[in-house]
Amino acid sequence: MDTLTAAPDVPAPVEPPMLAVVDLVKRFGGLTAVNGVSLEVRAGEVVGLVGDNGAGKSTLIKCISGVHQGDEGEVLLDGQPVRFAKPIDARRAGIETIYQDLALAGNLDVSANIFLGREVRRRVVPGVHTLDEKRMLEESRKVLESLDIRIPRFRAEIDNLSGGQRQAVAIARAVYWKARLMIMDEPTNNLGVPEQRKVLSLIGTLKSQGVPVILISHTLPDVFAVTDRIVVMHRGRKVAEKATASTNSTEIVEYMVGARDDFRPEH
């Protein structure tokens, strides 16, 4: 009787990270703001990026999002090198950055902000088009409902909404336009406790939908509440990268102030 020989186990192909930053350097004159930083972000992952003021966090995310271009190193999206000349190029590739000022039009309502600059139009008569406000309103409600966002005064101007509601609109806008990676800069800053919880809940919703998030925050309890990994920067360098479950606030603060450094170059 012939015996069957078991086929050797073939390792499954490893998917490249959605975003990879490799040895990135950014200089401004004689100042090296980002010095050889590498990090990876995979689908459905929340990565905290922390560091004291001047650590290089903002410069790093601006290099990722097309505000700046690195002087050395590279940025890869799905394993392919990319170089964004301006922020709109990064947005077209699915990288959405929500800064503290949110870039919302305060005198417009929710749906107008979600479609700001990308308004839907309908033809009235040949050669004449007008805004399709009904469709934009319907689409806006759908995306807000998909994120479990409740805004009672949907027609209210953005300036008349709470800070948490404005954050929610900015997140909904990014999701509607097919964000593949979300970068959030201090999203809970200046919010009350209930609104902070709502924003953190939205980050959890994005994670469950497979949208990775880079969270920049000085509020360590928020970072520990929602992240999978924490990357710490100090004076332009990455000094630590820890699984959130295997570290604590005391250790992270020690890295932030320079008392520890896992990646110190050897002399």
Image (tube, rainbow, N blue to C red):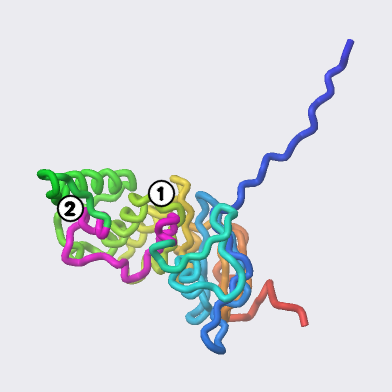
Q: Is residue 193 visible?
A: yes
Residue at 56% in and 52% down: 78
Q: Position of residue 144 (x, y in %)?
A: 28, 48
Q: How many residues crowd mark 1 within 10 Å: few (<14), some (14–19), many (20+)? A: some
Return the residue nearer the eye: 80 or 257. Answer: 80
Q: Quadrant of residue 30?
A: bottom right
Q: Is residue 83 left or right of residue 121?
A: right
> Is residue 115 part of the magenta span, yes or no?
yes
Q: Is residue 118 left or right of residue 152?
A: right
As measured in the structure, the alpha-carbon distance from the residue carrying label 2 to the one carrying label 1 is 21 Å
SS under mark 2: loop
Q: Is residue 255 visible?
A: no
Q: Position of residue 240 (x, y in %)?
A: 63, 69
Q: Which mark is residue 154?
A: 2
Q: Quadrant of residue 95?
A: bottom left
Residue at 42% in and 64% down: 184
Residue at 31% in and 59% down: 170
Label 2 vs 1, first from the N-terminus: 2
Q: Is residue 168 above or below residue 55?
A: above
Q: Is residue 199 above or below residue 129?
A: below
Q: Is residue 103 left or right of residue 218?
A: left
Which residue reaches farthest left?
A: 125
Residue at 34% in and 57% down: 171
Q: Position of residue 239 (x, y in %)?
A: 63, 73
The residue indicated by pointer 1 is: 205
Q: Is residue 174 left or right of residue 211?
A: left
Marks 2 and 1 in Cβ contact (< 8 Å): no
Query: Type of residue at label 1?
Result: Thr
The stretch of residues the image draws in magenta is 90-117
